[in-house]
Amino acid sequence: MTGLLLQLKAWLHWLGQVLLDGMLADVFDRLADLLFP
């Protein structure tokens, strides 16, 4: 289960980097940390 959460966090980070050109990558990282501490 933990591995799945880590994958989801990594995916959120990738999504922020690629789709938003890195502008909101930090926001996505913080969101992932809040959702999956």
Image (cartoon, grey):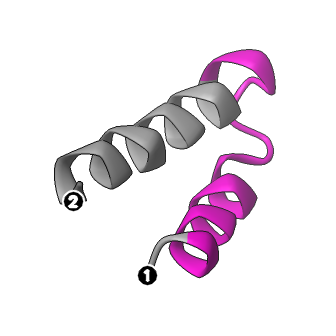
Whether 20 is among the magenta residues is: yes
Return the mark for residue 28.
none
Q: Quadrant of the N terminus?
A: bottom left
Instruction: Give yes or no for contact between labels 1 and 2 (Cβ–Cβ under 8 Å).
Output: no
| SS of the residue under disc 1 | loop
Vertical comparison of 30 with 22: above or below? below
Q: Which residue is mark 1?
A: 37
Q: Which residue is mark 2?
A: 2
Furthest residue toward front: 1
> Which amino acid is tagged 2?
Thr
Neighbour tally class for label 2: few under 14, some 14-19, many 20 plus, Cα within 10 Å: few
Place residue 28 in its image quadrant: bottom right
Q: Residue at x 78, y 47 (%)?
A: 24
Left or right for 2, reference 24: left
Vertical comparison of 32 with 36: above or below? above
| SS of the residue under disc 2 | helix
Q: Position of residue 36 (x, y in %)?
A: 49, 71
Q: Earlier in the sequence, mark 1 or mark 2?
A: 2
**Tag nearer the camera, 1 or 2:** 2
Q: Which residues are magenta?
A: 18-35
Q: Nearer the viewer, residue 19 or 9?
A: 9
Vertical comparison of 7 with 37: above or below? above
Could you tell me what secondary structure mostly forms the magenta stretch? Answer: helix
> Which amino acid is tagged 1?
Pro
Q: Nearer the viewer, residue 29 or 23?
A: 29
